[in-house]
Amino acid sequence: MSDKTANVPAVADALNALLADSFALYLKTKNYHWHVHGPRFRELHLLFDEQAAQIFATTDLIAERVRKNGAPTLRSIGDVSRRASIRDDDQAGVDAEAMIRTLADDNRILLGQLKEVKAAAEAGGDIATSGLVDGWADETEQRIWFLEATLGY
């Protein structure tokens, strides 16, 4: 068994964890997009929608990398829920500043997942996945930067 073949489960597992967190973050970001209110409504409504679209755009690519590694991917909302480390926010009336802080923190969690995928891919010689992760990490870092700049730090 080659090193790449031996590491396929590790890469697929890391990708599936990333996929679960991507769906969780996408839905939380859309939730905040739908429910933000206050004096900064328009600015935040548009920012959250833009970020949600960017996150969602990665989900199919992540799932396809899992399949290209010969493994099954997520099959249901329950599967996402069991695997995700980003937690839901079912609260009503979340303050806009709290939304921004939460999304920045959750994007940091996603960045950690990306680093795990990168390490697994490099250990397995999966240069295609490793290369894709670089772009996704850059987008995640940019989302964190925008959110933190919106908070003023």
Image: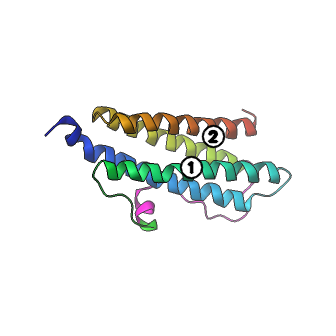
Circle 2 sits in a helix, a strand or a loop, which is it?
helix
- Residue pictured at 55% horizontal, 53% vertical: 56
Query: Can you tell which of label 1 and label 2 is closer to the viewer?
Result: 1
Question: Which quarter of the figure has residue 76?
Answer: bottom left
Question: Which quarter of the figure has residue 105?
Answer: top right
Question: Which quarter of the figure has residue 131?
Answer: top left
Three-letter amino acid code of the residue under disc 1:
Ile
Circle 1 sits in a helix, a strand or a loop, which is it?
helix
- Residue pictured at 35% horizontal, 33% vertical: 127
Q: Position of residue 104 (x, y in %)?
A: 62, 43
Q: Position of residue 19 (x, y in %)?
A: 45, 52
Q: Main secondary structure of the magenta part?
A: loop
What scheme was used to colour the molecule? rainbow
Q: Which residue is mark 1?
A: 55
Assess disc 2: are there few (<14), some (14-19) or many (≥20) residues with their C-alpha within 10 Å of its C-alpha. Answer: many
- Residue pictured at 45% horizontal, 40% vertical: 114
Looking at the picture, does residue 5 appear above or below residue 71? above
**87 within the magenta span:** yes
Look at the image and give the residue range highlighted in magenta: 79-97
Looking at the picture, does residue 35 appear above or below residue 147? below
Three-letter amino acid code of the residue under disc 2:
Arg
Measured in 3D between alpha carbons, the distance from the residue under mark 1 to the one under mark 2, in whole angstroms, is 10 Å
Looking at the picture, does residue 118 appear above or below residue 81? above
Cβ–Cβ under 8 Å for marks 1 and 2: yes
* Lower position in the chain sequence, tag 1 or tag 2: 1
Q: Which mark is residue 143?
A: 2
Q: Is 141 positioned to the left or the right of 8 in the image?
A: right
Residue 84 visible in the picture: yes
Q: Which mark is residue 16?
A: none
